Amino acid sequence: MSKPTDDDYALRGTATSKTGPAPDLPYLPPMPRDYRPRIALVGCGGITALHLSAYRASGWNVVAMMDLREGAAQGRREEFYPDAEVFTDLNALLQREDIDVLDIALHPEPRAAAIEAALNAGKHVLSQKPFAIDLDTADRLADLADEKGLHLAVNQNGRFAPHVAYIRAAIERGLLGTVGSIDLSVHWDHNWTAGTPFDSIPHLLLYDFGIHWFDMANCYLAGRKATTVSAQVQRIAGQKAMPPLGGHVMVQAGDALVTLSFNGNTLAGPVDRSLIVGSQATIQSIGPNLNEQALTLYRDDEVLTAKLTGQWFNDGFAGAMGELLCAIEDDREPSNDARHNIHSLEIAFAAIASAESGGQPIEVGSVRRVEASWIKGD
């Protein structure tokens, strides 16, 4: 049997289908034209190596790094920005008047206070995801940013993966017509979390990982609000991680339906697939992982292929910060602003509550906070 090619990851057209390139749409990470801010990183955990790598490749200047563990901040400085100043105290960092933007990559519990302090100090903020663990706090921080005339964005870096950004652009430009269904399925190996702090998060699948796909669905709905969510999760035979790695979620949004399928115990033959069906066209992106994707647009009798460059890692991280910097430069709201992300959180919180109830439908927006039992072990 011959080895599958990228074309084998795409739906087939008919024998008479016209083939060609998909429309040229903006999907590359947004980059400011002239704005060159001074950025500070708050929290220097493992994921921040991707942040700093993306910022350095984009030519952005990180002038300070802060972590309670001085060695962690020093390590990031030595690897990426040798001239950056190291801090172990946030208040001391905020005294630097020349800092324009803070990338706050702390864990959820201390993050809200750090965001509030940064906004009160007159700094724009890019917050790590999930943005908040309760929606009242999320609303309050968004209000504070408005009051201070500052921008508060969320590092939902999946939005800026090349295939996700292209799909968003296609929907925004009306190429699909009205979206009727969104099917997102991810089959991968998430057992790397076994023995790590992530292993103690009961709803790791929906809370920490699934938030990317809830946010993608929110973007693909293009302003239409999700109303109810039903979800179920379970452990899968043979998985090594403690939290359930299998799950199915159904989201209703008026006359649109979203279905999400997760299997984090796919040890061989991983597949990541997005299929969005509209009233005028269908778009599919599929591949063996998050970075390798083949994207096809089906319209009338046409089968159009998009040849995308780049990868989620690290274009997603460059895109999240780049969109904030462009918004500051252009004096507009960033597309990844806190208020838009709050609805993604509403969907995620409702999904977790539904899974806790055994799959009962939950009204989106009715669950205002993440319960401790959802994200902390006994």
Image: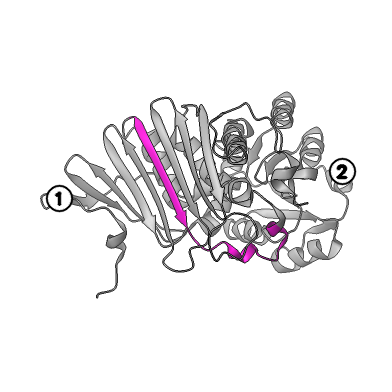
User: In which quadrant of the rendered image does the N terminus lie?
Assistant: bottom left
Residue at position x 34%, y 32% in the image: 174
Task: Tell which residue pokes out farthest to the left in this image.
Answer: 16
Tell me which amino acid carries mark 2: Gln
Q: Nearer the viewer, residue 185 or 233?
A: 233
Report the span colored magenta: 178-199
Asked which quadrant contains residue 110, the reply is top right
- Pinpoint residue 149: horizontal percent, then vertical percent: 70, 27
Q: Is residue 167 above or below residue 77?
A: above
Element under disc 1:
loop
The residue labelled by disc 1 is 14
Q: Is 81 positioned to the left or the right of 222 in the image?
A: right
Whether residue 230 appears in this view of the structure is: yes
Q: Residues within 10 Å of mark 1 (few under 14, many from 20)?
A: few
Whether residue 27 appears in this view of the structure is: no
Element under disc 2:
loop
The residue labelled by disc 2 is 95
Q: Is 63 positioned to the left or the right of 316 in the image?
A: right
